Image (tube, grey):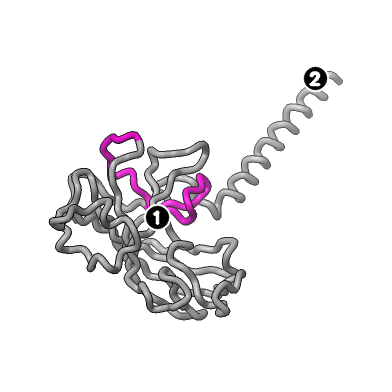
Amino acid sequence: MNMKWLKTLLLSALCLAFLAGCARGASDGGKKGTSSDIQLGDSFEESNSLAEGSLQVTVKSAERITDVSELPPQELFFENYDHHVLSDGTMKEGSSFILLKLEVKSLDAAAKLDRYNDPYVFRADDLLTLIDLTEKQGKNYYYIPVDYFSLYGQESEHSLAFRLSPGETVEFEVGYFVGKKRDGSERDLSQLRACTTSGNANSDFVDLNLGEDRDD
């Protein structure tokens, strides 16, 4: 009797472990926790606490720019231009400009917080930030803020705002100035990822396929 009871107990424990593993797999299915889950050109659905429904986002390309002549005019940047670009127009040592081209389609999204009296006005910085996989604070990553938005000023509500009704698609570019790491060491650009929230460790990550030896 004791041996039968022990076998039954072991079998029950194995079943519970299997079910727990399945539950974890199901709950993790909608959240990608590794840096290689999303590749350039792959679409993913973005839904967060700021919106009802979903926006379909595609990072179509990522470009590293080191030649300032390729940058947009200075007046289109938000605040970090002078921190990374010298007075003669050349880029400071250790600085790069990362330009992402995005395509965003509204599947059925409407803003939860009607910040701009229009439920179909969204902000580019609510979609993506930039993080370095080697720089964390606790469980979360430091994030690099958006410093350029190609639709800057088209919506008067906010410099990073864009309007998108359900079923519509919009393309735009966002840019980030990237310098040395916080400890002063050189940054490995291959560790940069587009992050679907502001550095949350449970975010989705897009591998930008950037490296220190690439200029495109």
Q: Nearer the viewer, residue 216 or 11?
A: 216
Residue 173 magenta = no
- Residue pictured at 49% horizontal, 69% vertical: 55
Front residue of this view, candidates 187 and 102: 187
| Whether label 1 touches label 2, CB < 8 Å | no
Q: In the rendering, which numbered label is found on residue 3?
A: 2
**Where residue 197 sits in the image (x, y, percent)?**
49, 55
Q: Nearer the viewer, mark 1 or mark 2?
A: 1
Marker count (numbered): 2
Q: Quadrant of the C terminus?
A: bottom left
Mark drawn on residue 81: none
Q: Label 1: how many residues lie within 10 Å, few (<14), some (14-19) or many (20+)? A: some
Quarter of image, res 14: top right
Q: Does 144 appear above or below 118? A: above
Observer-nearest residue: 194 or 115?
115
State left or right for residue 67 relative to residue 22.
left
* Residue 131 in picture, x, y percent from top left: 39, 48
Separation (CA) of disc 1 from disc 2: 62 Å
Asked if residue 186 is positioned above or below residue 124 in the image, the reply reads above
Q: Secondary structure at mark 1?
A: loop
Question: Which numbered disc covers residue 145?
Answer: 1
Q: Residue at x 42, y 55 (%)?
A: 129
Residue found at the far top of this picture? 2
Residue extent of the magenta highlight: 183-206
State the residue lying farthest toward the right.
1
Q: For the residue labelled by badge 2, is the local secondary structure a helix, a strand or a loop?
A: helix
Tell me which amino acid carries mark 1. Pro
Q: Position of residue 173 (x, y in %)?
A: 32, 67
**Residue 150 place in picture, x, y as percent:** 32, 71
Would you say the magenta stretch is mainly helix, strand or loop?
loop
Tell me if residue 2 comes above or below residue 144 in the rendering.
Answer: above
| Location of the N terminus (image quadrant) | top right
